[in-house]
Image (tube, helix red, strand yellow):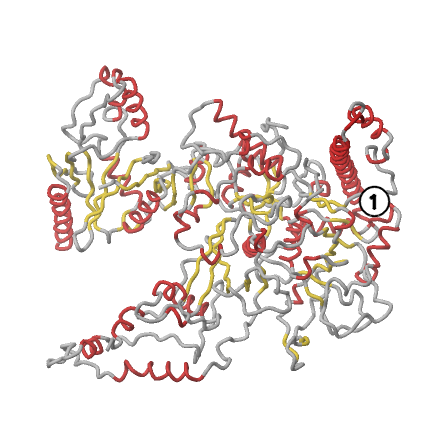
Amino acid sequence: MATSTADHPPVRISLIAGRYLVFDIDAVMVLRRSHGLCGVLTGTMPQNPTQNLFLSLPQELRAEEARMLVDRGAAYIADEPNDHLRLLKEMSSGAGEKRREAYLRELREKRVTAKRLFDEEKEAVRKMHEGKRGKAKKGKQTQKGEGDDSLFFDSAPSAAVQPPAPRESLPAITPSTSNAMLGEPAGTSGAIADEDLPEPSAFYKELNRRGYFTTPGLRFGGGYSVYPSDPFKFHAHYLSSCYGWDEKIPMLDIVTSGRLGTAVKKSFMFGAEREEEGKAKGEGQVRMFCVEWAGM
Amino acid sequence: MALDDDDNPALAAPPPAANTTAATPDAPAEETAEDLLEDEGAAAQDFRVFATLFKKNTHISAQTIRKGEKDFESHGTQLQADTLEQSRAAMQEVLSYTRIHSGANLVRGWYFPDWWADYEEGEEWQDSKAEDGKKERKPFGHIRDRVVILEGSSTSTQNLGRAVTGQAKDRPGRGRDWLLPEEALYLVERGSLDLWWPTREFGEIFPAPPAAPVEGKAPNPETTDANPSAQQADEEEDEEDEYANGFPLSLQAAYALLVGPDDSRGKISLQKFQVYSNLKRCGYNVLRAPPNPPNPNQSSYPLNITIKTFFSSLLPSLAPSPPKSGPLLKPGLYRSYNQIFAQLSLIERHIPSPILPSPLPSIAPYEIHFLVWKSSQKWTKLRHAAPDFYLSVVDAQESEVPQMEEIFGLLEQTPWAPPRKEWEGNHGRLYARLKNGWRNVLMAVVDHGVINYMSRSLQEDCVFPYKAMVPRD
Amino acid sequence: MALNQQQQQRTSALTKIVLNNLQHQHDWTNLHPHTQLNLPRALLYGLPPKRLYVHPDEQVEIIRAEKELGGDGRVPQEAELEWVLPLHLSEKWSPAQFAGVFDAIEPRPPGSGEITKAEEERAPWLAYKGSRRGKRVLLATVQDDSTVTYYWMHDGLVKPRQN
């Protein structure tokens, strides 16, 4: 499994109805390993769809996370509905014939692989059962059981372990991404111009620069929950809120947030970007303050 | 492992409550502000556990099955780095899974977004189960928003989808189940639906049925589909022609086609879909609320409640108002606190009533979006009791804390649901009454994929003082 | 002018309430008001009866040191002088104003005992009272009923205590 992510091509972020989604697991890993981004996994896990603890693709990012990645050259943002509609319509007519063929070819390869793995699995299970049954029969047969088994399986229907005959039906699959359709590498078709995207706050960029991971703060009553590193391994240190440099914060908000933070063993952290002469927005120094109960 | 499909739970029937593993069926109702304070339990996704629990043929060692303890901060140790890498690798493995639909379980859906675009939905009727032979109204179908037609049927169509009745006999695709965007996307996500993009006309893929199928019966998904012609034909066709009618779509494509802004027909907002699928995963039955909820407040209620409320609403105004310069309390001799209390009550208290003379309109986004039922064997998409919950979906970033009129507008879309009789009395269950209120609504607040459920109820705002003041003799 | 005067009276009343509260309810000693031209209002500083704040990293150092001492060995924890910022609950402060307070003060209030480099090297936890002490103020928030609540505010990112 690839751990080197430095030269991964730009990650495709799908903009759908104002939300930013990532569908490619490789991209998710790159964001996690190289960019300090964990996002939120929001999809139902097909392996076990009746629980809410472990969720699957897509991964949702905040707008400012998406924009930061774009600024870094690590991602581009695609207008996914329009891009898909355009390509799908093209593929329905002669104009997109090549793309359609390429897409279906790749799909077929996946189906063949699925079939093979599927059959191997079945075979293994059957082997296991046969083995057990063999032992259950007990007695003299167990002596030559080993040889018998292999003999038996060698003479078993060979189609199962070999590539399936063309007429045998392949299982249908639903790929997670449209990569095979979009072209490889995914290409920047449908990319949205940078200036149409909201700016990331200097506050967030600073946290990311320092290696902090952030998740939506709703659960703990803040803007973000801030983790010292990957939330897989660490507890959040801060519930955070971002303000304007001269924005008046009611003391009551500071006290209640500080109280809430202390209740969950976190500190309430707030910050703002210093507005300075001659510095553009987003370039100023970020000041941060941490509030916790004094215990008196 | 990634393609292991042998005992894919996705292919099993939708779970009854007992089968839900992670969430208790009552979760949304019970979740309250305390959940804000809970630690990361719910947020912590330990995929190492997942990988071993749901993958077959894995050598399960105690070390990997144990839930990984989180650390406070990085110590820079190799051990810490290794466990993190294990978690990440496990996540990568689990999320690399590809959804497979093997022969017998194949349910295919086709994306035809405009088939019902011009449909005008009126009231639909079905035979009542009651013996008087009356017809009962079908729940609102949101037919115009139904964009995916199912080829064949599955167990899921007992709870999802809708066949549009009253169509001409030679209408193509007649009698088939159509899915709303959230239903289709949810099924694709859980690996129960193979969604296809058609490259041919609707009528070519779903030719008009040759003979009239059974008419006038309540739709039964198991039997209405006597004509899976497209499916059969498909299997007999050559490999070359497998994609003659269209081709399968990815999960990404399904999102691109089915998720859209709130006001677009045939799409659903991502926030609403996230709430919908969250509830479905918990085992709830969920339907879109009708656009104009049949005003539950205009139906008739037992007269005695009305009269009682009517008279009690007159009580406070009967008390004479005190002189402007005071005193509040007329000087004199009092033998009972009640007389004093009555004079002290200056502001007319709100008395909840089942009848709303002029219900407030709901103000977007504080509207009822979903009707939710606890999991039940008896529930079907067409026949069910009143919903257990009325749910509104709100985006955490785009909306402020609602104003009073927004809350009232929302609450007044829900039916009168007074506290139970047995909770009343001096030693009654005060907290149960307070929690229940008189009208109830659940709000799902969505912050970039993280959902918090909050319940709001209309309180009798003077429950304490007034009840306490009622004569005790 | 009158308004300014009124405001001054108000903040000095606030300072007095907090000072009294610290002295009589919380047994602080050595309490002094502290004014400075670049401070938006008077601060207080004083000595709490016991140590009020231990940085998580210092905690680790102390535990390590006590382990070395073995058995019942304890590292004595002497109280240190702390800054106090009196505020009223109805006030609204901007990040710029808080930054102004932190920029105007030293980490350690006047009269804090000197800790030499040599001492810090011998006992690493001492550095958190000396050269490694960050800027922090105790926010003393007064309510109309003269209840005072106390919260720490640190300048910069300071990880939470784990107790």
Q: Amino acid at mark 1?
A: Ser
| Front-lying residue, B199 or B130 | B130
Q: Is A285 on the left-hand or right-hand side of A140? A: left
| Front-lying residue, B188 or A80 | B188
Query: 10 Å neighbourhood of mark 1: few (<14), some, or many (≥20)?
Result: some
Q: Is B406 on the left-hand or right-hand side of B82? A: left
Q: Residue at x 82, y 55 (%)?
A: B231
State whether residue A275 appears in this view.
no
Numbered label tally: 1
* Residue A30 spot, x, y in % from top left: 58, 33
Residue at the extreme front of the image, as rendered: A139
Which residue bears the numbered disc 1? A169
Chain containing mark 1: A
Q: Is residue C102 above or below residue B357?
A: above
**Element carrying mark 1:** loop
Q: Residue at x 65, y 40 (%)?
A: A188
Q: Is B288 on the left-hand or right-hand side of C129? A: right
Q: Which corner quadrant holds the C terminus of chain B?
A: bottom left
Q: Residue at x 72, y 40 (%)?
A: A180
| Front-lying residue, C131 or A192 | C131
